[in-house]
Image: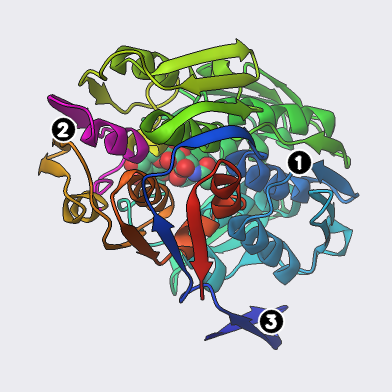
Amino acid sequence: MVLNLTYVNGKKYRVVYRLILVERFIIKGGRTLSGRVSISGAKNSALKLMAASLLSGSETTIRNVPMIEDVYTMVEVLKTMGVKVSIDTTGKTLKIHPGSIKSQEAPYEMVRKMRASVLVTGPLLARFGRARVAIPGGCNIGSRGIDLHLKGFEVLGAKYGIEHGYINCSTENKMGHGRLKGADINLDFPSRGATENLMMAAALAHGRTTITNAAREPEIADLAGFLNRMGACISGAGTDTITIEGVETLHGAEYEVMPDSIEAGTFIAAASICGNGVIIENAVRHNLEVFYLKLKEIGVNIDAANENTIRVDRPEADYRPINVSTLPYPGFPTDLQPVITVLLTLVQGVSIVTENVFENRFMYVDELNRMGANIKIEGHHAVVKGVRKLSGAPVRAFDLRAGAAVVLAGLAAEGTTEVSDIYHIQRGYENFDLKLKGLGADISMTG
Ligand code: UD1
């Protein structure tokens, strides 16, 4: 049992007893998965919509929110600032009332837990003219800077300084806290977080902002859809050029989070590894196009019954090795790199997996090798030599997606796999074990 101290409103300490650090998944491999699984709302959209709700002073209702640890962390971030949040876990709905906000600070305790906390910077800066946010620091999948976010805020007229591990951003001038000013921003790299932070900041800026070389993920379009529902004027989100006509104020809105493509991809990968007759509902094929095509290239018996349902059946022929390289959307998603590597581990021949988005995203490979995989890392490439079988072992979940990968390996392995540090998985997958169990997996949680 773990004691977790949380700093709230600058005064009180809240004591939270958590079991998450000692919980493990115990998986008995070898079962064939079948049946239906329904995909939850997208983590990487819900967190941004929660941050965006800070842009107005009135209530916002967000539906289809996945009830996962990262969402609870963002709720804590908002509550720490004095924002009222009510959670309906059954109805998967959040009501956020930022009218009561008292501080514009995201403390280290929370940013350290979840890097996406930095996404409150843009909305706070735009609405209040200031934001104090802890610097996220290192993370298990690479150093992940926020320089592009900061450079963009500067172009919009903000100043920032770093002090005691915090970034202080401000629009202050001789006249007090001024408004951000629309400008042309070209991103050196199509960073998703920078695109989102800057789009939110520009929504309340004076004049027009154009972001070029913007990230194009469907979640960016989802965020723009929400902002427009709040009264913003944004076009082009989902393409590499986004235009934002700043408005003076935004109001509360109701919105439904899009389905999670990475969760869908994870279940598709699980079904490809050890399934027959698995139907994945709320999986928007269009958002998974490159992943879908790569699975076809491997020989996975995958079929899009309609735009939102994907079915995976046992293949008629042996799978084939392939090469795959991650790239920003619409390229192959880095978040699905670990799970496709597990699949390729069991494909005869040599496959090459190249990671172009994050450094250190192959840390789970040693865990797979302990289960009998044959993978060698050369720079940012993984050379995967297919093996006939994996065998169960105690393994660690190094991060969210790496955690999902070792669970999938456990489902395919002979014998028992014990996965520790599963709090990483619980950060981003809603009821992962229960959903797999629903498909017939032998997986249980011990604490
Ligand atoms: C988001 C997703 C994450 C996904 C990633 C890439 C969320 C909460 N997380 O993360 O699941 O894996 O997109 O699709 O939505 N970079 C910089 N400077 C910056 C910003 C980024 O150097 O200012 C670098 C990062 O170190 C990284 C790359 O750009 O190597 C991608 O980062 P980014 O697209 O910003 O990813 P996140 O928004 O952090």
CB under 8 Å between discs 2 and 3: no
Task: Give the residue at mark 2.
Answer: 386
- Foreground mark, 2 or 1, reads 2
Q: How crowded is mark 1: few (under 14 residues within 10 Å), some or many (20 or more)?
A: some
**Which SS class for mark 3?**
loop
Residue under the image location 60 percent in, 60 percent down: 69
**CA–CA distance in space, label 2 to label 3:** 54 Å
Say if the magenta span includes residue 354: yes
Front-most of 50 and 430? Answer: 430
Front-most of 413 and 113? Answer: 413
**CA–CA distance in space, label 2 to label 1:** 39 Å
Residue 425 position within the rendered picture, expressed as x and y whole percent measured from the top left: 48, 56
Residue under the image location 83 percent in, 34 percent down: 230
Say if the magenta span includes residue 68: no
Task: Write down the region rendered in magenta.
Answer: 338-363
Which is more N-terminal, label 3 or label 1? 3
Front-most of 169 and 342? Answer: 342
* Disc 2 residue: CB within 8 Å of ligand 1: no
Is 121 above or below relative to 193?
below
Is 225 above or below relative to 109?
above
Residue 426 position within the rendered picture, expressed as x and y whole percent measured from the top left: 54, 58
Task: Give the residue at mark 3.
Answer: 10
Classify the position of ligand 1 by quadrant: top left, top right, bottom left or bottom right.
Answer: top left
Which is more N-terminal, label 1 or label 2? 1
The residue under label 2 is which amino acid type?
Answer: Gly
Task: Give the residue at mark 1.
Answer: 64
**Left or right of residue 225, residue 285 in this image:** left
CB under 8 Å between discs 2 and 1: no
**Left or right of residue 266, residue 196 in this image:** right
**Left or right of residue 264, residue 230 in this image:** right
